[in-house]
Amino acid sequence: MMLRNLKFALNSAWQSFWRNLAVSLAAVLSITLILILAGINLLVGHALSQVLDGFRAKVSEISINVSDDTPLQSVYDFEQVLTADPRVASVRFITKDEALAQFKADPQNVVFAQQIEGNPLDAKLEVHVKNLSDVAGIDTVARRWSGVDPTDPTNYQGDFVNRMLELSSWLSLAGVALLLILMLVSVVIVMNTIRTAVYHRRKEIEVMKLVGATEWFVRGPFVIEGIMTGLIAASIALALLVVAYPPAVDRFKSDIGFIPLSYDPRFITILAQDLLLAGALLGALGSYIGVRRYVRI
Amino acid sequence: MGYTARDLATRARRRVTPQQETQPMVLTPDFESRPVISFQRVFKTYPTGTEALRDINLEVPEGDFLFLVGPSGAGKSTVVRLLIREEKPTKGKIFVDGIELGRMKRRKLPYYRRKVGLVFQDFKLLPNLTVYENVAFALRVLGEPDQHVRDRVAEALDTVSLSAKENTYPANLSGGEQQRVAIARALVHAPRFIIADEPTGNLDPATAWEIMQLFLRINARGATVVMATHNREIVDLLRRRVVAIDAGQIARDDRSGRYHDDVAKPQVRAQ
């Protein structure tokens, strides 16, 4: 019996979708637009988190400059202290020679490197912290150490890190807020669309109720129609986004070179799952609410 | 030859063959048995403040054929709406087949409606479905298997003599034919009660009479029929039970009544 009811619901959802094609297409178009916006939001969010991850990797590293007259044993001791610190992920000691070699290896420094005499660079301890917010603490510890170069203790730029942290939390909050607004708008749109469909079929619903159809029997076809609408819209939105994603990334990369943005094909799978699921849910929820008033006996 | 309602109800459940039915049967409702429909001190006041029914007491035995008569706005439709649980009584109790309608849970309502066949003045057919599909609709809603649906619909259309028009759309049928489709839909799930609200209201006298014959046959098979009507000729001719409602109260309840109470309203006879 369940199967027969499901068959009936699928049939009548399909018929209703085609019979009210204009209304159905309007709904598909609206939800497609919303899901495209949602998809862009997700993609931009993903790109931003890519960028932020890049920055994070850079700024969660702090270099402690060692003054030239510090005995090697003292450096090793301090390295031990840092390694034992729970906030620290790893510590690497870079000697003056290594620092110079690194400096010379950078193609940007070619001209400058040729003019250097001797080795003006400090030896340094490169510390990787586990958590970006702990960089400040390590910086304080480093500045108290006797062997630090007093003129240029560390490369820590507190202000920059804090701003980055603040920015990233604001951006993710804004993204979530935008998504919520988009979801709400699309539920309202689906609700109104289904309501129009229901209004066209109110006589049928009345008769269904009079001959003893259960509420779910009446509601089923509309909810399925909503899910269908949502899935079609999600597929269109997804297709457009998949086509537009790589060229958009290329365009941004060429415009703003320093941002570590890259095309991420794995994210497409996640995007597909999210959009299809969101489309189906929005469609179902919208039609459930839309049909509610008419189905209540 | 007299049958009691109970005999007929039993026979109807055994499915009477057309041959067995050639002899017209006269139904004698068993007024002594427990009523299947019972109104106990029912009051209905609408939210607008209109007092539609006041202190209605009514008992309907199984197999009864009851006309509800009275002027427009007297409360006939309210009685019908209470019976199909479109409305709940403000005060008092209504029992149908042992169920108290006012206390019935909302999710039980569909199952109650399946016991009842409904016929309306405006037919309430679905214009985008054929005659066959309209009748089948009442069974599809119940999730009946296809073969069963086909058999029962064929049987119901045969009862109302519309088998030849099963692929026609309601718009291409006459008023009488449309009402016959509605009756076929009302009886296709073999309900124990038929509730009709002005079923002949939109039909000419000859067609109205045809429709009444159908209701009588359904009643003779054992279904209890409650019919609100304005059709004086039919009520007077059939001499069935008549409950007259006036200003929200039962003015008269005759087991073999007429549309108007001749003694109380001599001016009617003068017409």
Image (tube, rainbow, N blue to C red):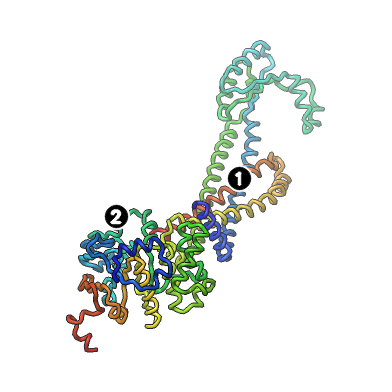
In-image side of B28 versus A286 (left or right) = left
Give me the residue at 24% from left, 63% from top. B39
**Nearest to the observer: residue B238 or residue A23:** B238
In-image side of B130 versus B116 (left or right) = right
Question: Which of pointers 1 and 2 indicates the residue nearer the eye?
Answer: 2
Indicate the chain on which mark 1 is placed: A
In-image side of A87 versus B266 (left or right) = right
Which quarter shows the C terminus of chain B? bottom left
Observer able to see residue A52: yes
Give coordinates of residue A20: x percent, y percent: 55, 65
Residue furthest bottom in the image: B270
Question: Label 2 neighbourhood size at 10 Å, few (<14), some (14-19), many (20+)?
Answer: few
Q: Secondary structure at mark 2?
A: helix
Q: Write down the quadrant of residue A210 in the picture.
A: bottom left
Quick check: A249 above or below B206? above
- The residue where tag 1 is placed is A273
**Nearest to the observer: residue B219 or residue B38:** B219
Quick check: A76 above or below B192? above
Q: Write down the quadrant of residue B237 in the picture.
A: bottom left
Give coordinates of residue A120: x percent, y percent: 74, 22
Give coordinates of residue A271: x percent, y percent: 62, 45
